[in-house]
Image: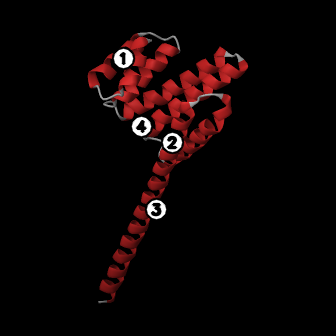
């Protein structure tokens, strides 16, 4: 009987620990999603007037998406938004310094983030379209660019402005 009570207490303690760990994970995911949505909002505000005067929105977006990725680095939406933020940072830095090499480095880093996002979620048309657009802007109209462009069109679902930008390049 003593063994039975000890076993029940052990099972109960194990269940409580599992419940607490699950709750902790849920809170971390919730905080990461909240950081992602803040990053998305800040980047949208920056896009309305993408210049040095409004760089605080871009900085806020970059900081928020970095926090989200620290919690959940394998989230394709987070990776895609981090890529977009990186391209804007590179563009502004290149504009302020006149260094196209810096912009090129940001494109390469963003392309790598998009490759990771595509590996995690290959049916996401917007990621393929962004990848094709950034490859084109980086001057890399190669087979990888062509495949990304075709995949974006095949999957559909990307917003029409992004598809039009991708096709225009």
Q: Is residue 96 above or below residue 68?
A: above
Between disc 2 and disc 3, the foreground one is 2
Q: Are marks 1 and 4 in contact (CB under 8 Å)?
A: no
Q: CA distance from mark 1 to mark 2?
A: 27 Å
Q: Earlier in the sequence, mark 1 or mark 4?
A: 4
- Label 2, secondary structure: give it: helix
Q: CA distance from mark 3 to mark 4?
A: 22 Å
Q: CA distance from mark 2 to mark 3?
A: 26 Å
Q: Earlier in the sequence, mark 3 or mark 4?
A: 3
Q: Looking at the picture, how far across and down is residue 48, in whole percent?
A: 54, 31
Identify residue for label 4.
76
Q: Residue furthest front?
A: 48
Q: CA distance from mark 4 to mark 2?
A: 18 Å
Indicate which disc residue 107 carries.
Answer: none
Q: Earlier in the sequence, mark 4 or mark 2?
A: 2
Q: Are marks 1 and 2 in contact (CB under 8 Å)?
A: no
Q: Are marks 3 and 1 in contact (CB under 8 Å)?
A: no
Q: Is residue 62 above or below residue 138?
A: below
Q: Tell me the residue at 35%/24% (across/down).
A: 160
- Label 4, secondary structure: give it: helix
Q: Earlier in the sequence, mark 3 or mark 1?
A: 3
Q: Is residue 136 above or below residue 83?
A: above
Decide: few, some or many residues near mark 2? Use Cα within 10 Å; few <14, some 14-19, many ≥20.
Answer: some
Identify residue for label 3.
24
- Label 3, secondary structure: give it: helix
Q: Quadrant of the C terminus?
A: top left
Q: CA distance from mark 1 to mark 4?
A: 18 Å
Identify residue for label 2.
41
Identify residue for label 1.
149
Decide: few, some or many residues near mark 4? Use Cα within 10 Å; few <14, some 14-19, many ≥20.
Answer: many
Q: Quadrant of the N terminus?
A: bottom left
């Amino acid at each position: 009987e003593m063994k039975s009570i000890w076993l029940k207490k052990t099972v109960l303690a194990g269940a409580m620990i599992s419940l607490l760990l699950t709750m902790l994970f849920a809170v971390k995911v919730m905080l990461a999603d909240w950081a992602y949505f803040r990053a998305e909002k800040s980047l949208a505000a920056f896009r309305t007037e993408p210049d040095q005067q409004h760089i605080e929105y871009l900085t806020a977006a970059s900081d928020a998406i970095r926090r989200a990725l620290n919690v959940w680095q394998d989230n394709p939406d987070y990776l895609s938004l981090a890529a977009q933020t990186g391209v804007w940072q590179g563009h502004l830095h290149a504009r302020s310094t006149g260094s196209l090499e810096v912009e090129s480095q940001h494109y390469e880093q963003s392309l790598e983030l998009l490759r990771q996002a595509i590996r995690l979620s290959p049916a996401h048309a917007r990621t393929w379209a962004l990848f094709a657009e950034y490859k084109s802007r980086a001057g890399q109209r190669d087979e990888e660019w062509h495949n990304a462009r075709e995949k974006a069109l095949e999957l559909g679902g990307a917003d029409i402005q992004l598809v039009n930008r991708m096709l225009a390049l």
